[in-house]
Amino acid sequence: MGAFGTTLNELNQNDPELGIQLIAGLSSNFLNQVMEGTLDASLLTESSPFALPQTVQWTELYKEPMILILPNSIKSSRSHDSQLPVIRFERNTWTGHLVEQTIKVNKLKIQDSMELNSVAAIIELVRQGLGYSIVPKRANIAWAEDRQLSLKELSGKTIYRKVGLLERRKHSDKMLLKSLSNNFYRE
């Protein structure tokens, strides 16, 4: 959760009537719930393949570069190639589209292995030496201290996963946006 925990605690203390729900899921599902009015707002990744309707607004909070991760068990002379399979983020998700875009832009030749929709699960499988992956470089992970992973910046164009607040343009609590923006907004 990183800084989200602190922010959520502040919001809860400042406005105990505010209904905060923490739900893990796909960004596309949360987009639909915000558009339907089931939710006033949602934190999600921005990569919608279609334009957002006028009834909602997007505020970017931060962005994460897509990076290549390899198990440290691979000798330094051996890099990502056909000898080791790719563990992909599920292709039909927004993050999965970013992974595909990263592969194409960087002209990577890969051998697919399996697909998951959890960055944490993918990282763990890479740690176990089952393959390599392209994932967003999440801010709440101590990458430099992880002795089981090697991180590689891709030599081509860097693709970013953007994380932000999607909210209905008209809802009762604009304090949420202000608090989140104050804690996360980075230029």
Image (cartoon, rainbow, N blue to C red):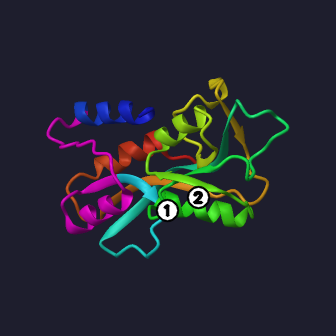
Q: Which residues are magenta?
A: 14-42
| Residue drawn at 37 percent across, 58 percent down | 27
On the question of residue 169 being in view, the answer is no
Q: Is residue 15 left or right of residue 75?
A: left
Within the magenta stretch, is there residue 18? yes
| Residue drawn at 22 percent across, 57 percent down | 39
Q: Residue furthest front?
A: 83
Q: Is residue 58 left or right of residue 167?
A: right
Residue 19, quarter of the rendered image: top left
Q: What is the number of the mark on residue 99?
A: 2
The amino acid beneath tag 1 is Arg
On the question of residue 149 being in view, the answer is yes
Please tell me whether residue 117 is drawn above or below residue 9 in the rendered image: below
164 or 108: nearer the viewer: 108
Q: Are marks 2 and 1 in contact (CB under 8 Å)?
A: yes
Q: Residue 136, image x and y in percent?
A: 57, 48
| Residue drawn at 45 percent across, 39 percent down | 183
Residue that label 1 marks: 91
Q: SS class of the residue under badge 2?
A: helix
Q: What is the number of the mark on residue 123?
A: none
Q: Residue 11, image x and y in percent?
A: 28, 37
| Residue drawn at 36 percent across, 55 percent down | 26
Decide which of tag 2 and tag 1 comes sooner along the chain: 1
180 or 107: nearer the viewer: 107
Q: Residue furthest right?
A: 77
